Image (cartoon, helix red, strand yellow):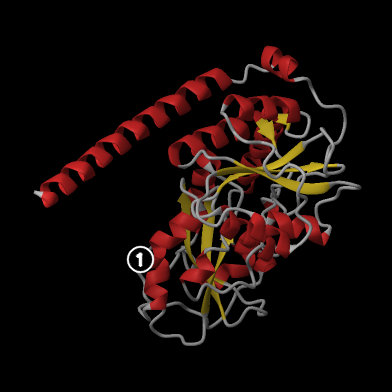
Amino acid sequence: MEKPPKAEKCGPFIEMVLDELNCNLDLHDKEKIENEEDLKKFPGHHGGLYIFYMKPDSESDLRYPVYVGVTKQSFKERFERHAKHGVIHEVWNGKFPRDVDGLGLYAYCTHYHGESAKRIKSILLDTFDFALKKGRNTIDISETYPAEWTKRNLEFPWDELKRIADGEDEEEEERKKKKIPSEKGGHFIRFLLDELNCNIDMYDQEEIKDPDDVNKFPAHYGGLYLFYMKPDPTSDLRYPIYVGVAKKSFKERFQRQAADNFNGILSKIWSGEFKFEGHGVYAVCTHHQGPAARAIKKLLLDSFHFPLKRNRRGQLRRELDTSEQLPAEYVKDNYGIPWEECLEKVAVIIEEYDKELYEVLNGLKYTLFCTDI
């Protein structure tokens, strides 16, 4: 075996490594990256360690790794940049690979981020020769080394890899302990939305049962939104399960949530993948947009553990928790959630936006005045 071995020849072993790290290798394995529309299927809310690989077709078991990277942005944003001037751009424009036809580009997106992701990337780069990291415009698919054979013949830091995996598990457990299940924080989340002057009652009795129900939501603006479950339309019990920000319109975003069979929130609920009994899904659509919406979303994600996220194996983290909800005052007094700081930050953002809008309108009035003259 050459040193360092070419990554494309060690595809099965690299899969073994990712398996040891409990990464979900099947997540996007049948989703070829052919055009910009394909990039939308990748997570838009988190990033981390990723590997680009090539294979003959979506059903093939042959995988040739060609690039490893780490992104602080979301996978979707990073891949969009790769499409403009990076790995994806090279493949789409026929610059890579030069010597092989009939291979498509795919990606592993892992749950590892931050320092853990950097350490894994460093191990992989120290061990293997990735074509698009070493400036090679060709790949060698003459043979693929079996995983077990590679394991016996390659010096690989398994102990360090285990420490990374164990540390990630401990960090995840610690993060969970510090957060309240979002369903138990339903009263506090409603209190927060009231403080933010959100109209919570607008769609509160309109259950979202099928794709047709999505058409009732605003098509001309978007912003911060929450999905929640409750037993019936008139119930005062609300169990928040997901928070997001719609950059376009609520209607367009919810249509995507209904159509995406893997990551779509509404699709998960309607298909029965998200386990619940006797509850329907509802939505709060707020007027907060841009930086204000992102600030509120960050506070909620930092403070609460929402169930509709996938774990490292691509499974939903848990079922709906309908145990007794915590009173809003109790959460305020006992969990140290910086909600007042968030309200102040949102107020400043809105004030700055209003000033900018005022200046724009004044400028427009002046322009119209001069035109009349």
Coordinates of residue 293 in the picture (x, y in percent): 51, 38
54 to 72, vertically: above or below: below
Tally the marks: 1
Front one among 34 and 211:
211
Coordinates of residue 162 in the picture (x, y in percent): 66, 43
Quadrant of the image occupied by residue 28: bottom right
Q: Residue furthest bottom?
A: 101
The residue at 51%/44% (across/down) is 119
Q: Is residue 211 left or right of residue 372?
A: right
**Amino acid type of disc 1?**
Lys
Front one among 363 and 228:
363
The residue at 74%/46% (across/down) is 282
Front one among 215 and 38:
215
> Taking the image as drawn, is residue 261 in sight?
yes
The residue at 57%/55% (across/down) is 43
Q: Is residue 334 left or right of residue 14?
A: right
Coordinates of residue 116 in the picture (x, y in percent): 55, 41
Quadrant of the image occupied by residue 304: top right
Instruction: Identify the residue position indicated by label 1 in the image.
Output: 84
Quadrant of the image occupied by residue 174: top right
Q: Is residue 262 left or right of residue 218?
A: right
Coordinates of residue 370 in the picture (x, y in percent): 11, 47
58 to 65, vertically: above or below: below
Q: Residue furthest right?
A: 278
> Taking the image as drawn, is residue 257 in sight?
no
Q: Secondary structure at mark 1?
A: helix
Q: Residue furthest front?
A: 373
The residue at 80%/59% (across/down) is 270
355 to 84, vertically: above or below: above
Front one among 130 and 257:
257
Q: Residue furthest top?
A: 333
